[in-house]
Amino acid sequence: MSKLIRTALVGVGLGASVASIAGCSPASSGDEVVYHASYPVYSSVEDLESSSDLIVIGTPISSEVRQIDVAAEAPVPGDSELDPGSGDVEGEELSSLLTYTVYEVEVDQVLQGDARRGETVEVAILGGTMGGVTYREAEGIDPLALNEDAAFYLAAFEGAPYQPLNSAQSIYAKSSDSTFTSVGVENPISRDVAASLRAVTE
């Protein structure tokens, strides 16, 4: 039997996240929910840094999958991608609960923002498996490797874990020779960010 694949349209912005899940019946074990997210894209290192509430280099030491209520404000009226109630997304049901993998990241170096070396911060990345249902982001990143260093460019949300600014440009794996590689594939500024990180960590 083929598994059921549901579609979610997710508008993700600093201060607002809205999702709509296709279909009215709840997902069952073996189903897959695919999130289609809309993020801001950054054209320079300076844009990425100025948009970040927290920039750290740290180590993911544990993870758990949670559902997080991301409702912060009303969807954009009339936008069929961000507002499923606009009438262009037939049969869709608005939901503010999204499934995330939440990582405990032990901070090694703070480049910007309010954190201290040695403490842990929570970083939520869209997707994960819960109740036998797999939630993933279309064109998202693979799960982070535990106990491997990375740099994170993060947005802060009141009462919730930090989140990457977007899935393509916000996380950079750190190698043993202190070079950095973008975890996201479609990242036109990856080399510039990697060079910037290398310069401040040498």
Image (spheres, helix red, strand yellow):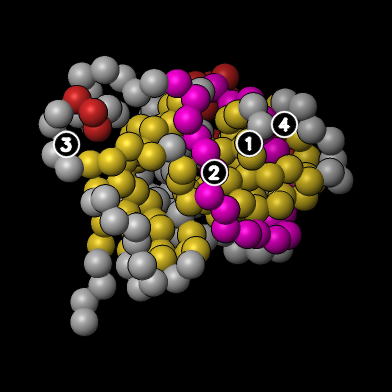
Residue bearing mark 2: 68
| Label at residue 61 | none
**82 with respect to 173 (left or right):** left
Q: Which residues are magenta?
A: 51-73
Q: Residue at x 14, y 29 (%)?
A: 87
**Outermost residue toward the bottom?**
1
Q: CA distance from mark 4 to mark 1?
A: 21 Å
Quadrant holding the C terminus: top right
Amino acid type, label 2:
Ile
Mark in front: 4 vs 1? 1
> What separation in Å lies between label 2 and label 1 (alpha carbons)?
8 Å
Residue 102 lies left or right of residue 125; in this view the side is: right
Residue occupying the point 58% across, 46% down: 124
Indicate the amino acid at tag 4: Leu
In this view of the protein, which residue sits in the foreground, 24 or 186? 24
Taking the magenta stretch, the answer to whether it contains residue 177 is no
Residue beneath disc 1? 160
The residue beneath circle 4 is 111
Label 2's element? strand
Amino acid of disc 1: Ala
Q: Earlier in the sequence, mark 4 or mark 1?
A: 4
Query: Residue tagged by mark 3?
Result: 89
User: In whole angstroms, how far apart are the C-alphas of marks 3 and 1?
Assistant: 29 Å
